[in-house]
Structure formats: structure tokens, C-alpha cells
């Protein structure tokens, strides 16, 4: 009797279950909008995002630790209290305002110039036909894979003879001629973007009486904002983080924030000598990470405001991880 009742309840339950709705909810109508697919996608996005965010989270967490928290193995991520003294000492050890000004001049100037000069060269390769065009473009791309160590001595001798060392001018002059750091990649980005502009748009401008230079500045550049943002951000970040050629060009006269990090321990010891006998003290890891955070903070703020155009530019210029 009990088996018959259970069978009736099971049949009644199965009759009122809509398997089609469950299938649609799990797999979706097109196979890519169901719960299972979305769960896999979000899992992958969160996993990849964590890999990229982990260093930033670690730096922020450790930079707010006091020496007691740093030495305590039970304090891993969350310090017992926010210890701001690390940032204050790192700020003065880096000579932050002065060094930041030099870093910005040395990074923003060539980045802005490269944004326009590489656009001009990329437009030429995308728009015009001239002898040996493909060979010249191949040579431009070939410069991208040449190691910096190969060209450092010729560049140093050239700018030494021009008496330009000890200033940001070597980077600026290279940028004016669409050269310098990663310029081949920027020219490639512009060329790929300009090839997507409809030829009918250019022809219409010609019919209206515009010459090539006017077409470039009045029509092409205004619709190339996404590509320009991508080039500007890439160039800025690479110039900001570059230390090898920067130290070669600036010498001992000027220094940038990443270069200052190399001498942070000596500067910190000079400023914060301890005890009545003025003994030398070494910097701890929290202060070093606070200094690192101060160095990358301007770039993080810039990306926070420019990420919309940056992502749009990445999509339109065809840059992918493939």
C-alpha cells in the first residue's frame, strides 16, 4: 500500500515538472546564456582577475603593516591597524614631489609626441602606395625585436655629441621622429586602425577640397581617439617603468621614481638614523612596498579614468592576446 502511494506521488511530481524550463535555465536558449555557461565564465574571469590583482592586493596589505605586524606570522593579510608612517617615510625618502615631476616630464612628453608622430607614420603606411612600402614596413617591425643593448652605445654617443645627456631630451627627440621606445608597435597599431577607415570618407573629403594634410588632422585624427588613447597609455607606462635607457640618458643629474627605488635604502638610512649615537638602520619590507605603491599610484589613477577609452581602443585596433 505504501509503495503504491509513493508511486502516485512520484508520478504527480514528475507530471508537474517542466523539464524544458530547467534545461533552458541550465543550458540557455543558445547554449551560451545558461547558468552552467555563466558559472564557468565567471569562474574563469574571477580566477584570471585574481592572478592580476594579487600583487596589488599584497602590496597594499603589507604596506600598511607596522613592524610588529610584519614580524608576527599570525598577521597575514589584514594588519591590526593601518600604519601610515610607512607611507610618510617612503614619501620623504623618495623625495616624492621632486622625483614625480621629473618622472612625469620624462614619461608624458615622449608619450604625447609618440601619439601624434607614430599616427602620421602609420597613416602613411595605411593610406599611400609608394615603392618598397612593404619592405620599409618590415624594417620598421624588425626594429621592435632589436635588443636595447645593441643600440645603447650608438644612442649614447649620438646624444653625448649633441650635449643632450642629463635631460629628457633624448627620449623626446626620438619620439619626434616616431622612434624610441616601442615605436614600431605603435605604428603597427595605427596602421591596423587606419585600414578600417572607409575609403569613401577620404574620397568625400577630397571632393570637398581638402588636401591630404587637412584630411589627416581634421578627419582622421578626430575619429582615431581610441587608438590614440591606447598608444598614449602604452607609451606612458613603458616610459614610466623604463630604467635601463633612462639611467643612461639622465645620468646622475636627474632621477625618476623607479630609479629612486634602487637607492631607497640609502636615502631612508640617511633620513632616519636611529639612537643617540645615530646608528644606521635598514628599511623594512613594509616601507619598501609603500614606496612601490607610491610609484605605481599615478598610473593606477590614470588608468581608472581612461579605462573606458583604453578597452574600446583595444577592441577597435584588433589587439588581442592571440
Image (spheres, rainbow, N blue to C red):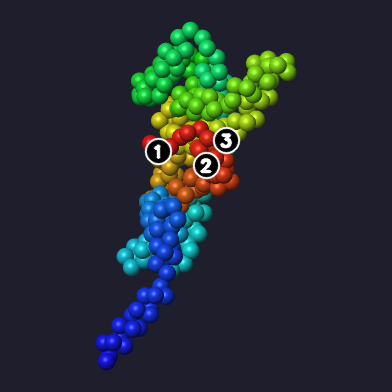
Residue 321's mark? Answer: 1
Mark 1 Cα-neighbour bin, 10 Å: few <14, some 14–19, many ≥20: few
- Give the secondary structure at mark 1: loop
Give the mark nearest the N terminus, 2 or 1. 2
Label 1 to label 3: alpha-carbon separation:
18 Å
Locate the N terminus by quadrant: bottom left
- The residue at the point 52 percent across, 42 percent down is 311
Q: Which of marks 1 and 3 is nearer the N terminus?
A: 3
Pinpoint residue 84: horizontal percent, then vertical percent: 50, 59
Q: x and y percent of residue 282 in the render?
A: 37, 51
Pointers 1 and 3 in contact (C-beta within 8 Å): no
Above or below 301: residue 162: above
Q: Distance between the residues labelled 3 and 2?
A: 8 Å
Q: In the displayed structure, would residue 207 be above or below residue 59?
A: above
Q: Position of residue 288 (x, y in %)?
A: 41, 50
Which disc number belongs to residue 311? Answer: 2
Q: What element carries label 2?
A: helix
Coordinates of residue 215 in the picture (x, y in percent): 66, 20
Q: Which residue is drawn at 50% across and 38% down?
A: 315
Disc 3: CA contacts within 10 A as few (<14), some (14-19) or many (>=20): many
Circle 2 packing at 10 Å, graded few (<14), some (14-19), many (20+), is few
Q: What element carries label 3?
A: helix
In the picture as drawn, the residue positioned furthest to the bottom comes out as 1
For the question of whether residue 203 can be seen, the reply is yes
Tell me the number on the disc at residue 226.
3
Residue nearest the observer in this picture, 124 or 251: 124
Amino acid at each position: 500500500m505504501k509503495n503504491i502511494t509513493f508511486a502516485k506521488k512520484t508520478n504527480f511530481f514528475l507530471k508537474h515538472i517542466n523539464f524544458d524550463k530547467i534545461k533552458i535555465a541550465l543550458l540557455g536558449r543558445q547554449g551560451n546564456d545558461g547558468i552552467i555557461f555563466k558559472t564557468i565564465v565567471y569562474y574563469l574571469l574571477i580566477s584570471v582577475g585574481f592572478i592580476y590583482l594579487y600583487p596589488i592586493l599584497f602590496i597594499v596589505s603589507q604596506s600598511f603593516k607596522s613592524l610588529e605586524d610584519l614580524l608576527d606570522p599570525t598577521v597575514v593579510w589584514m594588519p591590526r591597524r593601518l600604519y601610515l608612517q610607512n607611507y610618510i617615510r617612503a614619501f620623504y625618502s623618495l623625495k616624492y614631489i621632486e622625483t614625480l615631476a621629473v618622472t612625469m616630464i620624462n614619461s608624458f612628453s615622449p608619450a604625447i609626441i609618440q601619439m601624434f608622430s607614430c599616427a602620421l607614420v602609420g597613416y602613411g603606411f595605411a593610406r599611400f602606395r609608394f615603392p618598397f612600402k612593404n619592405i620599409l614596413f618590415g624594417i620598421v617591425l624588425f626594429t621592435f625585436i632589436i635588443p636595447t643593448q645593441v643600440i645603447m652605445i650608438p644612442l649614447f654617443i649620438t646624444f653625448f655629441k649633441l650635449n643632450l645627456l642629463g635631460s629628457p631630451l633624448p627620449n623626446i627627440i626620438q619620439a619626434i621622429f616616431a622612434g624610441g621606445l616601442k615605436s614600431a608597435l605603435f605604428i603597427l597599431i595605427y596602421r591596423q586602425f587606419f585600414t578600417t577607415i572607409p575609403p569613401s570618407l577620404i574620397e568625400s573629403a577630397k571632393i570637398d577640397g581638402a588636401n591630404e594634410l587637412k584630411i589627416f588632422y581634421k578627419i582622421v585624427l578626430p575619429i582615431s581617439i581610441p587608438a590614440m588613447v591606447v598608444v598614449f597609455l602604452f607609451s606612458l607606462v613603458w616610459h614610466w617603468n623604463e630604467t635601463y635607457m633612462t639611467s643612461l640618458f639622465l645620468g646622475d643629474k636627474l632621477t625618476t621614481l623607479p630609479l629612486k627605488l634602487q637607492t631607497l635604502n640609502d636615502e631612508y638610512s640617511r633620513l632616519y638614523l636611529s639612537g643617540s649615537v645615530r646608528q644606521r638602520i635598514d628599511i623594512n619590507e613594509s616601507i619598501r612596498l609603500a614606496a612601490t605603491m607610491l610609484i605605481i599610484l599615478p598610473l593606477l589613477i590614470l588608468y581608472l579614468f581612461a579605462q573606458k577609452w583604453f578597452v574600446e581602443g583595444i577592441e577597435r585596433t584588433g589587439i588581442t592576446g592571440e
